[in-house]
Image (tube, rainbow, N blue to C red):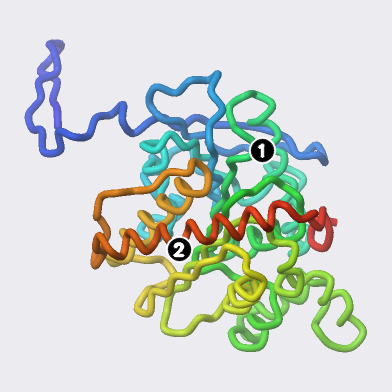
Amino acid sequence: MAKAIGDRAIVRLTALNPQYSAARWGTMREYAWSDDQGRPWKGGLMVPSGFDPKGRYALVIQAYGFSPTRFYRDGSNLYDGFTSGFPGRAFLAENILVLALPLGPASGGSRDERAQRIAFAQGVRGAVDALVAEGLVDRDRVGIMGWSATGESVLNLVTFTDTPIRAASLLDGDANTLFSLTITYAATDAIQMKKEQANQGGPFGATRERWLANDPSLHTECVRAALRMETYGQEVHNNWDVYALLRRQYKPAEMIVFPDGAHALARPSQRMISLQGNVDWFRFWLKGEKRSAVVVPTETVDSLRQQYERWDQMLTLKRAVDAKPGCGASGAAR
């Protein structure tokens, strides 16, 4: 804490956290680009202190909106007191750039569920292409995170497009899958209708084939990103099918369950596990780095060692996945 005395120099009154400085938090600036449909997008690019514009950095896209008036210490920052698993500026300490992705284009958007997923994928691809073209980002070291509704969009992105996403994280994400439709939502909150709109009809009768073409759980052979899934609450409502099917195919996937977690994690211990876990995940997959210090609640030296042993095994699996031809753009990308 500091205070200015009149027009004289600033005098420091306290130094409660001397390990932190304003420079360490990095900076956020507005960033604009266009997708391949010519629609404008306006997000925020967060860069670390000592940022070198000639360097090619790893990038994590945080997909749940952008507000130019917020500090982006961690979460989506769209709602006061409503947080999520986005580490925000913690990535900057690891020399990873962060792009805060808006929920849709600045103009030319749509209220149609399927059109929104397609626009999301096109917006992400446009942002990656723009940052790579500027020489700021390494195309082979891009990750993305989605929470709630954008978790569904991220799953569709890594399933149905060839956007170069090396690793992704779904934070209590929604899903337009048969499993999700049958065990979670119904007509009372219009979520069933949203899923059917996203998949061009329900999984029965005349629209069955369209559902089959658009349900990402039925196309998990196309997922190439290392996928971390977090689910909050006693029951795993979404993405258990995706996780199980990826494991059946020996693909890199991990699920972390918070049995007492709310949709927006609030307990400090839960938030620490989620936030640090995602920093670890993307450091490993985008930079090949591992944490050595024990910092997470209930963590031990042995459990941290096991985490990286597990991920090293996944890395071997991913190399095998990357060696195979990809599916290319299809389904929700069309």
**Rendered residue at 39%/74% (across/down):** 258
Q: Is residue 268 visible?
A: no
Disc 1 residue crowd, few under 14, some 14–19, many 20+, Cα 10 Å:
many
**Rendered residue at 59%/73% (across/down):** 243
Looking at this rendering, what residue extends furthest in the left direction?
Answer: 13
| Image depth: mark 1 or mark 2 in front | 2
Residue 127 is marked as: 1
Q: Which is nearer the N-term, disc 1 or disc 2? A: 1
Q: Is residue 294 above or below residue 215?
A: above
**Rendered residue at 62%/37% (across/down):** 42
Front-lying residue, 15 or 54: 54
Amino acid tagged 2: Arg
Q: Quadrant of residue 253?
A: bottom right
Q: Position of residue 266 (x, y in %)?
A: 32, 65
Q: Is mark 2 on a helix, strand or loop?
A: helix
Q: Can residue 252 be seen in this view?
A: yes
Q: Name the residue under label 2.
A: 310
305 vs 213, left or right, is: left
Q: How much space separates mark 1 and mark 2, taking CA atoms?
A: 32 Å
